Image (tube, grey):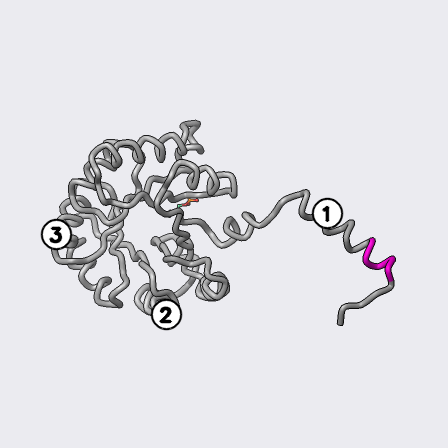
Amino acid sequence: MKFFVDTADVAAIAELNDLGMVDGVTTNPSLILKSGRDIIEVTKEICSIVSGPVSAEVVALTADEMIAEGRKLAAIAPNIAVKVPLTWDGLKTCKVLSGEGFMVNVTLCFSTNQALLAAKAGATFISPFVGRLDDINLDGMELIADIRQVYDNYDFETQILAASIRSANHASQCALIGADVMTAPPSVIKAMANHILTDKGLDQFMKDWAKTGQKII
Ligand code: G3P
């Protein structure tokens, strides 16, 4: 499973990238707001660090305007994936931009039918939002599994990019189901390293080591 980092925080991306944990990056208008940076500048900087797909989201609501914005965003770097919302106009935009050879990430997906339409429109990535379905007492992971089955039934090449990943548990479930990609905030990726028994075991080793009175360096 590929790891995308869901942030526009350049320092956090660089830290994870140095560890080989970054196969791509996803941003959205809320994350651009959080960064406090200009969308073009920060996206260009991210693309200079990360060689994999970097999603940059359009903000227009009509297809013609989305297409124009998408072309402008795609001009930032060759590894831009234009992110469009899963609306009818977003699907039109997906069809046009993917036909022009650009990567397209169709976002705000909450149903199998939406994922099916995105694949038909030539999406490179479909982004089902797991955490936001869980928020309303639906099962976000069930949606990932359903889309996996539908895409496999018909050999769609659109990659399932599990988004709105809020916990290490979400990450492992996505990997078990076979999501192609998950995008998660840096804190969630770091949390995947944690285990209570690791902490407990290390604590015991440190206590015993101190009793030996030895040093390695
Ligand atoms: O990639 C989409 C993601 O940023 C949404 O996450 O936690 O705001 O639902 P969240």
Instruction: Give the vertical position of 167 relative to 134 (above or below).
Output: below
Quarter of the view holding residue 9 = bottom left
The image quadrant where one finds the C terminus is bottom right
CA separation, marks 1 and 2? 40 Å
Do we see residue 103 in this rendering?
A: yes
Label 3 C-beta lies within 8 Å of the nearest ligand 1 atom: no
Residue at figure coordinates x 19%, y 37% from the top left: 117
Disc 2 marks a residue whose amino acid type is Glu
> Which residue matches tag 2?
45
Residue 69's disc number: none
> Which residue matches tag 3?
96
Element at label 1: helix
Do we see residue 131 in this rendering?
A: no
Q: Nearer the viewer, residue 52 or 213?
A: 213
CA separation, marks 2 and 3? 27 Å
| Proximity of marks 2 and 3: CB atoms separated by less than 8 Å | no
Instruction: Give the vertical position of 173 relative to 203 (above or below).
Output: above
Residue at figure coordinates x 31%, y 43% from the top left: 160
Say which label, 1 or 3, has the lower sequence index: 3
Disc 3 marks a residue whose amino acid type is Val
Mark 2, Cα crowd under 10 Å, few <14 / some 14-19 / many 20+, is some
Please state the horizontal and vertical placement of residue 172, each as a whole percent of the image.
Answer: 48, 40
- The boundaries of the magenta stretch are 208-212
Please state the horizontal and vertical placement of residue 3, each as a whole percent of the image.
Answer: 41, 52
Mark 1, Cα crowd under 10 Å, few <14 / some 14-19 / many 20+, is few
